[in-house]
Image (cartoon, helix red, strand yellow):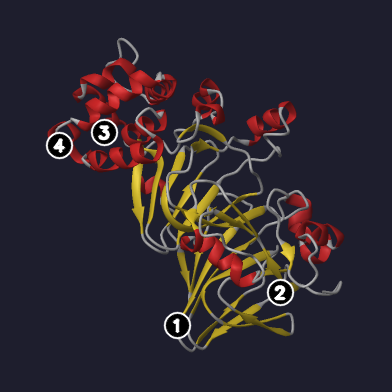
Amino acid sequence: MTRTDRVFQLVGSCNNYPWGKQGEKSLAVQLHKKTDPKFEIKKDEFYSELWFGDYPDFPARVLETGELLQDVLQKHKEELLGKKVIEELGGQLPFLPKILSIAKALPLQIHPNKELAAKLHQKDSENFTDSNHKPEIAIALSKFEVFAGWKPLEEVQSLFKRLEALQQFVPAGTENWSELTLREVTRSLLQADESTVKSVEEALAKASKEDLGTQTYILDLLPRLQDQYGATDNGSLVALLCMNFLVLDAGDAIYIPADGIHAYLSGDIVECMARSNNVLNAGFCPPADRNNIDMFADTLTFKPSTRSKDDVILPPQDQGKFKVYRPPMSEFDMLRISLLQGEGEDIEAHQGPGVMIVTHGNGTMLADGKTFRLEEGSIFFVAPRVKVRIDSPGGLEAHMAVVA
């Protein structure tokens, strides 16, 4: 590439967390292999995420030269990041896009807000590698199961009243539940010792459908989580008893705010977040990997206060042959471009940069006076103020994070 290149192809980095899908079952590593043909997929390895941003943990590189994307962006800030990013968003790529391939539950987690992230980074920069917040969106590429946010308070309260084994976690003297009650119940569930968790799960497995009401799905999910993490993981109780369980189809999306509790369960997704890798874990992981439970519970957010599955869903806006997902944050929007055979579409220039990955199909992209071949797995960086035209003879799906 040259100094004047404003559109160029990237290659991402794939990682191996144990919750990922095995071998070629992982979409993340399938897409990575198509851009990096020398990469060897090991059939017994778990491939969890494909990162293609400039964050140093698993960085993207320029395909042609091997240069780190971060280095190229810092050399040519004005051309490649633009005024808005330089003046308002920290002078580096403000978002971090990924493909996730999920075979079992990720850790029960939250991403700390900016104030807490700054404190944690100052205190422990090895484990909290930046001072930024990390609100995020996830767009399903296939069936996607997830625990996210809180059930309506009355549903949680009713369940804890009907099941005697759960009443030990409710603060004494509680009559009408509040957000404070839910916080303290969550704290108590996460602090319970292994024998208590095991006995509660045994009682939960014996609960009648009448006791569970509209939440009979708990009986199906409990043995599945036990098979993944055993019968003594506190995360199972919090997820099943207190959190929304959602099943999304391709194209559906959710938004997770900073301090928002979540645990992805299965599926393939495009994920994008503010540029951060900070996380607090409290379940679905070994005890040694869990963070301080009091800090976790104290940080939890309960907004929006209506609390329902609808609060988690991020509906897209239709714009021609693509959809726009606009999370309530300034760092990025996400475009989902879906072209049928022989179709094409224009994407107008944006104030800031964009990063696009082709998740299915093939085609061509006209941008900055050049034509680029789009193949499944192709990743491209697009500079600010560059208009893009995409055409596909056989059909194509792509996802693009942009600074609007």
**Cα–Cα span, label 2 and label 3:** 49 Å
**Cα–Cα span, label 1 and label 2:** 24 Å
Q: Are marks 4 and 2 in contact (CB under 8 Å)?
A: no
Determine which residue is flagged by label 1.
340
**Cα–Cα span, label 4 and label 2:** 57 Å
Which of pointers 1 and 2 lies earlier in the amino acid sequence?
1
Q: Are marks 1 and 3 in contact (CB under 8 Å)?
A: no
**Cα–Cα span, label 4 and label 1:** 45 Å
Q: Is mark 4 on a helix, strand or loop?
A: helix
**How many circles with numbers are drawn on the protein?**
4
Location of the N terminus by quadrant is bottom right
The kind of residue on which mark 1 rests is: Leu
The kind of residue on which mark 4 rests is: Lys
The mark lying in front, picked from 4 and 1, is 4
Q: Position of residue 310 (x, y in %)?
A: 36, 48
Bin the neighbour count of mark 3 within 10 Å (Cα to Cα): few under 14, some 14-19, many 20 and up: some
The mark lying in front, picked from 3 and 4, is 4
Determine which residue is flagged by label 4.
209
Determine which residue is flagged by label 2.
386
State the residue in front, 133 or 235: 235
Residue 287 visible in the current orientation? yes
Q: Position of residue 54 (x, y in %)?
A: 72, 55
Residue 158 visible in the current orientation? no
Which of pointers 2 and 3 lies earlier in the amino acid sequence?
3
Q: Position of residue 6 (x, y in %)?
A: 77, 72
**Cα–Cα span, label 3 and label 4:** 14 Å
Q: In this view, does 333 lie above or below 223?
A: below
As drawn, is 207 to the left or to the right of 80? left
As drawn, is 370 to the left or to the right of 247? right
Bin the neighbour count of mark 1 within 10 Å (Cα to Cα): few under 14, some 14-19, many 20 and up: some
Determine which residue is flagged by label 3.
155
Q: Do the residues labelled 3 and 4 touch (CB within 8 Å)?
A: no
